[in-house]
Image (cartoon, rainbow, N blue to C red):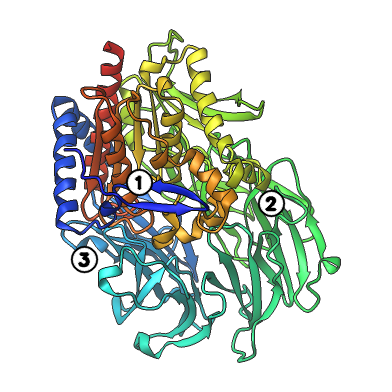
């Protein structure tokens, strides 16, 4: 089953680097498809059996309850997603008031029999009459915008294609909206083409996409990305401009119906700037300039220089996670040691109270309008299924917007937060969830999860599949590694570019802490991560193969020399560096790149690597080349090195419930079997 090796050699700054499995980059070739089929057969042979079947049955049972998204209110109507029981995809519902019965506006389950068409976002007009829905197929990042008339309960005829990472901003009159799209891509290159030259268009309802008006483009800067926003008073359109995944932003502004050029109000590209509201030409901005944990400033767009700024809310120890203006107040979600709290401030910056959240957990989005007296938000934690809430600002009362009736008893588990110290002494948070009263005798199968990158925080969140792990006596641990935003932009910078090794050191230290404290031992410790987290667990496995009993490496980035050549990969160079253009970046990434650090004859723990055949964010070649390299280097008869390639599936978002359950059963069957195998060796 070993893959064919070719004699492909690349040169980087005088270094010759072999790439023998370059042919696996062509995922559609007959040879690659045959190899994938053999890999999937081997994986199913390993995970299949009574344990996997039992897990799938258990997951199906506990998945069977109604789940809700965060509501959006528009002129007295409430729009939200609802997924009933084992329904493959959430549907979009609307209700005419707080006590009204919901009506289904869009059901993506009817668009394709296998459930692989997903509603990935929606934006309703200010009067609530129309809703623009973003749908994707087979987990692709490519999106199509479809528009629905909520009054007439009908879909409008137009389709807006070639959208990816698109933002939608309705014109105040409800007759159309701003959105972004890329140039058309040849169908054969759809899942491999790099994405450049995004443009902003205006679409008028019930007209063809070919008639859309071009609003903004930058042919001189093809890597810029645009996110349009309309000010709360309807006077201005803002463009929030980014370059890749770099958190720094630019802000351009113009009067909404003007033909004048956009004013480059914040164009230094030296920090994050996010407009959160305005009072005429005075805009309120969330920034990390001169405050890496976040502050709120007022900026006059006619005098945008920093010397004219007025600070309203200064930087604190806790990180500002998100801000919006509701009921004439700032609603700020703070992040405190990797969990959330919500505070209110008057527009002059004076405190105005806070919300008592149900437990230590996470706010999952929030909505509300400057003139409204209600805040809508979701809340979750490791032992608290996602729940939509409504907070009445006039009375200070918090109530459930919808009741979530989950079919399981969570009272027998507990979550606590601890802190450990990394290799360089940095204090790092760690959440632990397990059955109450466990003995710290090193016997428990433990799953350590991490991410550590792209300014993304791992705050507490409920997962049905992780509940199955807990039911089998497992401990679930989440490490809040550097590279995220748990402690602001400095925490992020401490885990990127030439400091990326800090992330791996943090994760290794978390594993050592779990063993030292008696939660588990190496043979009972599994690690899991996806995407950048897949890179994390792959690198940590290669650096410390003795420390783990099993590894699940999901949709990973593993080829750090060529990642930027495919689809969204070019967005990540600010995080990882570009090995082609910089010798320093080459030396940094080559030192940890999983594909290039596999050692011949080394004994690695059992490994399950996953990908999706239509993943156009982290393309399948990363998982496939890494699998082939590990298999070729492995000692004959050593631990299994398995690859699972999902069909009609992308990076994870929009995956139908049936596929989620099937994949989770495979992953947890692998972990339990591999950890038992490691224990018996």
Question: Would residue 637 be visible to someone looking at this image?
Answer: yes
Q: Secondary structure at mark 2?
A: strand
Position of residue 331 in the picture relative to residue 563 (left or right): right
Q: Residues within 10 Å of mark 2 (few under 14, many from 20)?
A: many
- Which mark lies nearer to you, 3 or 2? 3
Which residue position holds label 2?
Answer: 344
Most foreground residue, 619 or 260: 619
Identify the residue under disc 1: 555
Disc 3, SS: loop
State the image coordinates of residue 638 (x, y, percent, origin top left).
25, 22
Using residue 229 as the reference point, say whether residue 305 is left or right of it.
Answer: right
Between circles 3 and 1, the one closer to the viewer is 1
Separation of residues labelled 2 and 1 (CA atoms): 39 Å
Choose the circle earlier in sequence order: 3 or 2: 3
How much space separates mark 3 and mark 2, taking CA atoms? Answer: 42 Å
Marks 3,1: beta carbons within 8 A: no
- Give the CA distance from mark 3 to mark 1: 26 Å
Question: In this picture, is 518 found above or below 429?
Answer: above
Local crowd size for mark 3, using a 10 Å CA cut-off: few (<14), some (14–19), many (≥20): few
- Give the residue number, with chain letter if any, for mark 3: 111
Vertical arrangement, residue 518 with respect to residue 233, above or below: above
Residue 416 visible, this angle: no
Label 1: element kind: loop
Neighbourhood count class around disc 1 (C-alpha, 10 Å): few under 14, some 14–19, many 20 upward? many
Q: Is residue 365 left or right of residue 624?
A: right
Which quarter of the image is occupied by the C terminus?
A: top left
Give the numbered dot on residue 591: none
**Mark 3 vs 1, N-terminal side:** 3
């Amino acid at each position: 089953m070993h893959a064919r090796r070719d004699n492909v050699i690349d040169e980087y700054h005088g270094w010759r680097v072999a790439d023998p499995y370059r042919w696996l980059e062509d995922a559609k070739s007959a040879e690659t498809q045959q190899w994938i089929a053999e890999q999937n057969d081997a994986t199913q042979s390993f995970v299949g059996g009574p344990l996997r079947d039992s897990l799938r049955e258990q997951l199906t049972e506990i998945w069977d309850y109604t789940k809700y998204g965060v509501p959006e209110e528009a002129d007295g109507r409430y729009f939200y997603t609802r997924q009933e029981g084992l329904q493959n995809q959430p549907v979009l519902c609307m209700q005419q008031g707080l006590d009204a019965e919901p009506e289904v506006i869009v059901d993506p389950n009817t668009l394709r029999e296998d459930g692989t068409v997903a509603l990935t976002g929606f934006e309703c007009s200010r009067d609530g009459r129309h809703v623009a829905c973003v749908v994707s197929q087979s987990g692709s990042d490519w999106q199509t915008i479809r528009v629905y008339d909520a009054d007439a309960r009908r879909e409008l005829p137009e389709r807006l294609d070639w959208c990816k990472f698109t933002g939608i901003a309705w014109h105040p009159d409800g007759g159309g909206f701003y959105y972004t799209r890329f140039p058309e891509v040849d169908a054969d290159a759809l899942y491999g083409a790099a994405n450049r030259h995004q443009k902003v268009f205006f679409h008028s309802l019930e007209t063809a996409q070919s008639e859309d008006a071009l609003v903004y483009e930058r042919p001189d800067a093809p890597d810029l990305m645009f996110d349009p926003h309309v000010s709360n008073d309807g006077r201005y359109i803002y463009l929030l401009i980014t370059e890749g995944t770099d958190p720094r932003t630019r802000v351009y502004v113009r009067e909404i119906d003007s033909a004048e050029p956009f004013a480059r109000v914040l164009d230094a590209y030296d920090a994050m700037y996010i407009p959160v509201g305005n009072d005429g030409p005075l805009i309120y901005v969330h920034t990390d300039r001169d405050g890496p944990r976040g502050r709120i400033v007022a900026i006059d767009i006619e005098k945008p220089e920093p010397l004219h700024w007025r600070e309203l809310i200064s930087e604190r120890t806790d990180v500002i996670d998100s801000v919006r203006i509701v009921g004439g107040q700032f609603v700020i979600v703070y992040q405190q040691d990797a969990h959330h709290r919500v505070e209110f401030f008057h527009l002059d910056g004076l405190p105005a109270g806070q919300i008592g959240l149900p437990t230590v957990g996470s706010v999952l989005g929030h909505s509300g309008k400057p003139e409204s007296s209600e805040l809508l938000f979701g809340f979750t934690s490791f032992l608290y299924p996602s729940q939509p809430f409504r907070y009445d600002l006039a009375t200070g009362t918090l109530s459930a917007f919808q009741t979530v009736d989950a079919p399981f008893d969570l009272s027998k588990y507990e979550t606590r937060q601890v802190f450990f110290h990394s290799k360089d002494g940095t204090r790092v948070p760690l959440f632990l969830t397990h059955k109450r009263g466990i003995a710290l005798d090193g016997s428990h199968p433990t799953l350590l999860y991490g991410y550590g990158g792209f300014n993304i925080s791992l705050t507490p969140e409920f997962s049905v599949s992780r509940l199955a792990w807990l039911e089998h006596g497992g401990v679930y641990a989440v490490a809040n590694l550097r590279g995220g935003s748990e402690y602001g932009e400095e925490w992020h910078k401490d885990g990127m570019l030439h400091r990326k090794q800090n992330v791996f050191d943090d994760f290794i230290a978390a594993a050592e802490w779990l063993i030292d404290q008696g939660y588990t031992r190496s043979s009972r410790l599994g690690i899991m991560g996806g995407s950048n987290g897949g890179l994390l667990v792959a690198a940590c496995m290669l650096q410390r193969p003795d420390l783990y009993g099993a590894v699940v490496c999901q949709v990973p980035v593993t080829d750090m020399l060529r990642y930027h050549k495919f689809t969204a990969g070019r967005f990540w160079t600010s995080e990882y560096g570009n090995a082609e253009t910089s010798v320093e970046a080459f030396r940094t990434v080559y030192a940890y790149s999983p594909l290039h650090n596999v050692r011949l004859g080394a004994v690695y723990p059992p490994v399950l690597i996953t990908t999706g055949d239509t993943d156009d964010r982290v393309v399948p070649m990363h998982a496939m080349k890494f699998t082939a390299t590990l298999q070729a280097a492995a000692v004959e008869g050593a631990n299994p090195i398995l690859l699972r390639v999902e069909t009609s599936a992308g990076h994870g978002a929009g995956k139908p419930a049936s596929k989620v359950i099937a994949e989770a059963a495979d992953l947890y069957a692998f972990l339990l079997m591999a950890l038992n195998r490691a224990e018996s060796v």
